[in-house]
Amino acid sequence: MTTTAPGLSERAVRAAHAHRTADPDGFSRRHDPDQWNRWARRARVARTIAAALQVSVDTVLVTDDPHHQYPTRTGPVPGDLITVTDPVTGRAWRFIPDFTTPGDGWLLLDQCPDCATEVPLTRIATLSDLGDYLDPDGDAPIADEARDDSNHQPDCALVLPTLGQLTTSNPET
Ligand SMILES: [Zn+2]
């Protein structure tokens, strides 16, 4: 049996359905005058992180970050929450912008190794940064942002100043 790849129109309609399902409000309002600029900027964010992580751009969704707002001249705006869904495993990887490297790097959100709250844990600019973080033998440093105690449970050990570098090593090793 031979299968031909779907044409652009079919892929476009599929992409629209997928986006509307994943982010109904953002998708329906994207042409509002105050939204189009953000929509187009987020499209660039998706292209950039897709290239950095060597994934297809249609695996990336950029939506309003429910936990982070940023001040602008016209008032606070929601930050970007970037979700990369692995088509192989279905796992969703979540990132927020790294404002020390605007447009070029991101902070991976993952469970705090101590209190299990989702926090920004490590800086990612390339696929190898993610690999170093995931590799039990890697030594990816945790980001300073990971120690912001407002993100953690009150008794979390990660924010204690006496704690040395915490790695995400495999507990079986
Ligand atoms: Zn914690």
Image (cartoon, rainbow, N blue to C red):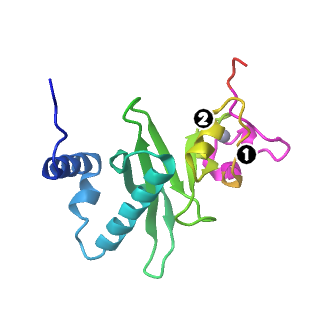
**Residue 118 visible somewhere in the drawing:** no
Residue 158: x percent and y percent?
73, 41
Residue drawn at (19%, 46%) of the image: 14
Q: Nearer the viewer, residue 127 or 160?
A: 127
Q: Which is the main secondary structure of the residues drawn in magenta?
A: loop
Q: Residue furthest front?
A: 2
**In x, y percent, where is residue 124?**
59, 50
- Looking at the rendered structure, the secondary structure element under dot 2 is loop
> Quarter-wise, where is residue 172 in the image?
top right
Q: Is residue 139 visible?
A: yes
Above or below for 56 versus 98:
above
Q: Quadrant of residue 59?
A: top left
Q: Residue 150 placed where, x, y %? A: 64, 52
> Which of the four quarters of the rendered structure image does ligand 1 lie in?
top right
Position of residue 126 measured from the top left corner of the image (x, y, whole percent): 57, 50
Image quadrant holding the N terminus, namely top left
Tell me if 98 is positioned left or right of 144 in this view. Answer: left
Q: Based on the picture, tell me whether residue 108 belongs to the magenta stretch.
A: no
Instruction: Specify start and end residues of the magenta stretch as a single range.
Output: 146-169
Label 2 or label 1, whichever lies nearer to me, is 1
Q: Say which quadrant the C terminus sits in.
A: top right
Q: Which amino acid is tagged 2?
A: Ala
The CA span between labels 2 and 1 is 18 Å
At label 1, counting other C-alpha atoms closer than 10 Å, the crowd grade (few under 14, some 14-19, many 20 or more) is some
Residue at the disc numbered 1: 141
Taking the image as shown, residue 57 lies to the left or right of residue 9, namely right
Residue drawn at 29 percent across, 51 percent down? 23
Q: Is residue 104 left or right of residue 44?
A: right
